[in-house]
Amino acid sequence: MQRLESGKLAARVHAEILQAIVRKEFTEKLPSEEVLAETLNVSRTTIRSALQSLEEVGIITRKRAIGTTINPHVRASALALQRLVAFDDLLREKGYDVEVDTAWSFGVPDADIGMHFPQLDPAEECVLTEKRYEANGHLAIWIRDAIPREHLRSEKFKDPIPASLFEFIHLYGRREIAHAVVEIAAMVKRDEETTPIETAVGEPFMQLHETHFDNRREPIAYSIIDVDNAFVTFEVFRRS
């Protein structure tokens, strides 16, 4: 893990510890609050806040006299659907060599996005992004995002843009993404125009329709994600 200097520290510490867990820098237990605070160059109060948020999403369990243990379900496949782990990390965990290609433009959403997100004005100009995740040279995940221009505070993007929509919004959006609602659809490739995912015509693939909301519960971005079932499966962790 790397020492942190400034910013929204609790959220950054949360992300840094989670990535360290996914990378298996820690396996069964986390170091003490004191060691984590020294390692990351933050206060123990910040560490406690980050650990509390990790416990709330089911990543860790904290018990007095035992310490902070990592829950056994924590795998990329169980975290990617919650966007706690990036899709490229999910593919790498499965042993694939991964390449990510991103592109963007200004324009109006296409009919497919408009069909799945009727609350998005079809005439509204958006930043339209396309992201391709290739695993061992095969397209495993294809993502299209639409971010209405009115939700941007800056249009001076640095190429390449981040593959993570959350990071893109953090850098250029007026307000952060607070949560997302995901509809999971089972799709069938009808013809070669249906999806660039390399499944055969007539074969199924998964499609995610994500609406991203700010802390005012207003939608600020929209995503359609095509997933090749041969490369990616998702798991859902449910707490009792």
Image: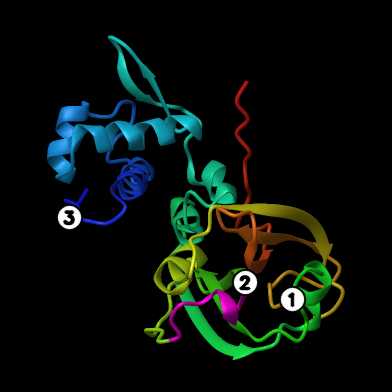
Q: Compare marks 3 and 1 and give the one earlier in the sequence.
A: 3
Residue at the spot 34% in from the left edge and 46% down from the top edge: 23
Q: Earlier in the sequence, mark 2 or mark 1?
A: 2
Badge nearest the viewer, 2 or 3 = 3
Which residue is nearer to you in this view: 226 or 172?
A: 172
Q: Which residue is mark 3?
A: 5
The segment highlighted magenta reads: 145-155
| For the residues bearing labels 3 and 1, Cβ distance under 8 angstroms | no
Image check: 199 left or right of 83?
Answer: right
Q: Amino acid at mark 3?
A: Glu
Asked if 157 appears above or below 89 in the picture, the reply is below
* Residue picked out by circle 2: 142
Q: Is residue 227 left or right of residue 37?
A: right
Q: Position of residue 94 (x, y in %)?
A: 49, 52
Residue at the image point whose x is 51% and y is 67% from the top: 165
Which residue is painted at 21% across and 28% down in the image?
33
Q: Are marks 2 and 1 in contact (CB under 8 Å)?
A: yes
In terms of secondary structure, where does tag 2 sit? strand
- Label 3: how many residues lie within 10 Å, few (<14), some (14-19) or many (20+)? few
Q: Secondary structure at mark 1?
A: loop
Which numbered marker is on residue 195?
1
Q: Nearer the viewer, mark 3 or mark 1?
A: 3
Whether residue 217 appears in this view of the structure is yes
Q: Where is residue 118 shown, x and y percent of the image? A: 82, 69
Residue 216 picture location, percent across and down:
59, 55
